[in-house]
Image (tube, helix red, strand yellow):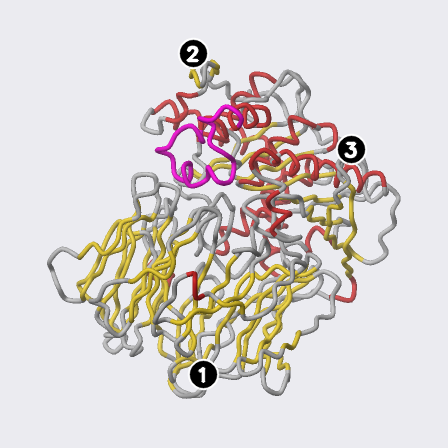
Amino acid sequence: MKIKNRLYAILSGIVILSSLLMVSCAQEIKPVVESPAIQPPAAQRIAHADTTLGDVRADDYNWLRDRENPKVIEYLTAENDFTQFKMAHTKALQDTLFNELKSRIKENDESVPMRWGGYFYYSREVAGQQYPIYCRKKGNLEAPEEILLNQNKLAEGHDFLSLGSYRISPDHNLLAFATDTSGNEVYTLQVKDLRTGKMLPDMISAVDGNVQWGNDNKTLFYTRQDAAHRPYQLFRHSLGETGSDKLIFTEPDEKFWLEVGKTKDEKYLLINLGSKITSEVWYLDADKPAGEFKLIEQRKNGREYSVDHKDGDFYIVTNDQALNFRLMKTPIKSPGYMNWNEVLPYDATIKLDNISVFKDYIALFERADGLKRIRIMKAADKSLYTIDYPDAAYTVWPAGNAEYDTDLVRFGYSSMVMPTTVFDFNMTTHRLDTLKVDEVPGYDASQYESKRVWAVASDGARIPISMVYKKGLRQTGDNPTWLYGYGAYGISMEPYFSTSRVSLLDRGFIHAIAHVRGGGEMGRDWYEHGKFLEKKNSFTDFIAVAEYLIQEKYTHSTKLIANGGSAGGLLMGAVANMRPDLFQAIIADVPFVDVVNTMLDPTIPLTVVEYDEWGNPNEQQYYDYMKSYAPYENVKAQDYTDMLITAGLNDPRVGYWEPAKWTAKLRQTKTDQNLLLLKTNMGAGHGGASGRYDRLKEIAFEYAFALDRLGMAR
């Protein structure tokens, strides 16, 4: 069950933007301050107050929430103009960086073909084009190419394009896909006949983007959102029928999201219902799409489970009596909880993330000692085999395992030094075949090294830090360092490879990831101790990591850049209030900073769903605690460091007004003359620009800001 959250992600093969950014410098020189010909925008203060549980909160910038107010757009535009003015002297540097970033990507590239149902499916990118082209070949790789979908053509006339679901029908003759052209994550569903190349008249607007086929090749299941952008209804559509689609299921609980899925063997359709801490799954024979879904096991607060199918049994990954999750199975004829039986003994030191089911094997995707791994279980005797990896800090992930009846499991592998490599592992012979190593022109992995070190938090917790740098680094206390953090939803920030990062490593940088509590790097308990009334652990962990890097002479506060996005932007806002002296600059991408006001407004996307993450501020203990750390509430008259803040006007996850209000309050309150910039993308949402070249320009802009703040713009 994939539940949306405040994760700043890029929808492409390249990695999370907010963690790509680092900087380099060789001397402690404050950047040249431009002429004050253009003054920082001063947002109008309009008296407004809200009262919660008897507590009155002044909010003079509440008016910025009304995007229909022309003065709001005027203010955002003024901030953008000011940002461009202050960054104008870095234009040549931005161009240089963009060309560097572009030179390290293979502009004409192709994914590893995935075999499925007699076809080989793949995508490719063409130099000069922003988006991928989806293709297939029938029978073998020497067959003629068939273009299924060209995103570049779909994007014509639009500044933004995001592809949601992309589903081939079971007979491989039809393609259902959903597109968003504004960034607000509301999609239009279309169907293409792959035999004729023509679009069918079936077009459904205002859907969530989640789609599945029935096995009759004419029935589509899709979801719709409520006013708060929560997927909550499942509809059934029959191709060619013009009447109203049938509403199949409605989830009334505002904490729960609805997703439609399908088992690996394609035998069952699934309704996955989930809050942040609780799950419920319903199933339907995919050969009988007009039938009724049946319940596997009703929800129980705090119990999570996900389902796949094999040989008449549902295989279940659950945290029931297993904090780090375990594997169980139950017969389809009577799938209720009383018949759940453990498949493997539970090991509390191993976090079971998910599984991939095959005819004779089950691949277990796990986390041990803070690092991902894959174990293969033979279904017949439950024997286990662990795949080994060469690096000290790395990540692995499933990579296109569409076929059920196969001995091959495909996975991707990357470390902070090694570019992404795609492997096929034979689960019978244990042979490992390299299918593709991403080409990075001009990159020599032997010149770089990575390692994992540990900081100690104020309560004694050991915080892992993944870091990469160019060989020959000396701990002299003057290395420019980019410190990235997230720490929410149990999401792990993986030690992956970034082609963009090389531009900064080559300028002498250390790139470090602070794996703070609230993430999932060290198991479920790591997450539990960074949420609710322990959220401040995320902030103090990040501070402890920064202090460690300084104490161990990796860097100095005048050389340290902090970065985080979305919920990681909350982290940036909190540490900016708590310890602005630790950082030379902070870059906060689409930051979730107006925590109290957002979590008190149930009409905003994610609010009610995320009561199980942050707490419900209508309850006194959560209100008081949330207010004590919320970045917007805790802006105070003190010196702040240089800051770049980004926003997306169409962002449904973190409203543009959160970074806008925060910027306005900082300008009015802070006591320093350090640089504060707000950059709003007026045509995109949570993930920023959608085209690959446009994304590189955004990265180059943020790199240039950081380099400039470190005196390295020349």
Residue 89 in percent (x, y) is at: 62, 36
Magenta segment's dominant SS is: loop
The answer to whether mark 3 and mark 1 are in CB contact below 8 A is no
Sequence-earlier tag: 3 or 1: 3
Q: For residue 616, say whether it is visible.
A: yes
Circle 3 SS class: loop
Looking at the rendered structure, which numbered label has been put on residue 29? 3
Choose mark 2 or mark 1, whichever is in front. Answer: 1
Looking at the rendered image, the quarter that the C terminus falls into is top right
Instruction: Judge by depth and name the residue closer to the eye, 40 or 297.
Output: 297
Looking at the rendered structure, which numbered label has been put on residue 405? 1
Looking at the rendered structure, which numbered label has been put on residue 685? none
Circle 2 SS class: loop
Mark 2 highlights which residue? 47
Q: For residue 651, say whether it is visible.
A: no
Instruction: Judge by depth and name the residue closer to the eye, 320 or 649.
Output: 320
At 52% from the left edge and 70% from the top edge, which residue is drawn?
399
**Which three-letter amino acid code belongs to the residue tagged 3?**
Ile
- The segment highlighted magenta reads 598-621
**Which three-letter amino acid code belongs to the residue tagged 2?**
Ala
**Which three-letter amino acid code belongs to the residue tagged 1?**
Asp
* Residue 314 higher or lower than 561, as above or below: below
Mark 3–mark 1 distance (CA, rounded to whole Å): 62 Å
